[in-house]
């Protein structure tokens, strides 16, 4: 009789443990890997339509950003990561700008791409 009671208690305890785990670790409300926000906006600066000032009126496509705006985007991102780094030369590469990230000795550390229409950063090398 004690064995049946122990088995029932173990079964009920395991069931409650599984249900509590499912409630606590609900995959529908998980916030891992950018789920629930705008695709990783915590890690990569995102272009916000009204604040950039070059949004086309109505439902038209936004205007392309210029070299100075691309430089500002990279400069603000790099200064948050490491204030000792700076922005070097900017080259037009078609759909994006290639921007050099340099150190205080003017050595190129990284090439960063800035998409002309979304303003998103991408690593090039």
Image (cartoon, helix red, strand yellow):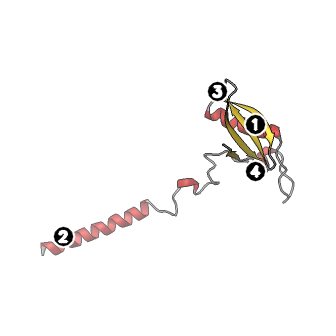
Q: Distance between the residues labelled 4 and 3?
A: 27 Å
Between 2 and 103, the one lying in front of the other is: 103
In the displayed structure image, the side of residue 123 where residue 25 appears, left or right: left
Residue 113 occupies quadrant: top right
State the residue position of label 1: 72
| 24 versus 86 height, above or below | below
> Residue 42 appears at what percent x and percent y?
61, 46
> Residue 120 appears at what percent x and percent y?
71, 47
> Residue 56 appears at what percent x and percent y?
86, 53
Q: Which of marks 4 and 3 is nearer the N terminus?
A: 3
Label of residue 6 in the image: 2
Q: Earlier in the sequence, mark 1 or mark 3?
A: 1
Between 63 and 108, the one lying in front of the other is: 108
Q: Which residue is drawn at 28% across and 70% down?
A: 12
Label of residue 118 in the image: 4
> Residue 14 appears at what percent x and percent y?
30, 67
Quarter of the picture containing the C terminus is top right
Label of residue 84 in the image: 3
Quarter of the picture containing the N terminus is bottom left
Q: Which of the two discs, 4 and 2, sits closer to the camera?
A: 4
Q: Distance between the residues labelled 3 and 2?
A: 65 Å
Cβ atoms under marks 3 and 2 closer than 8 Å = no
Q: Earlier in the sequence, mark 3 or mark 2?
A: 2
Cβ atoms under marks 1 and 2 closer than 8 Å = no
Mark 3 closeness class: few <14, some 14–19, many ≥20 residues within 10 Å: few
Q: How far apart are marks 1 and 3 (CA)?
A: 16 Å
The secondary element bearing badge 4 is classed as loop
């Amino acid at each position: 009789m004690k064995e049946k009671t122990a088995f029932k208690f173990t079964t009920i305890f395991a069931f409650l443990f599984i249900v509590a785990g499912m409630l606590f670790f609900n995959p529908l409300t998980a916030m891992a890997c950018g789920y629930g926000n705008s695709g990783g906006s915590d890690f990569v600066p995102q272009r916000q339509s009204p604040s950039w000032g070059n949004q086309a009126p109505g439902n038209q496509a936004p205007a392309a950003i210029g070299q100075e705006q691309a430089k500002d985007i990279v400069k603000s991102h790099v200064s948050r990561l490491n204030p000792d780094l700076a922005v070097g030369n900017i080259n037009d590469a078609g759909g994006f700008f290639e921007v050099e990230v340099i150190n205080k000795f003017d050595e190129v550390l990284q090439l960063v791409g800035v998409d002309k229409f979304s303003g998103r950063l991408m690593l090039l090398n």
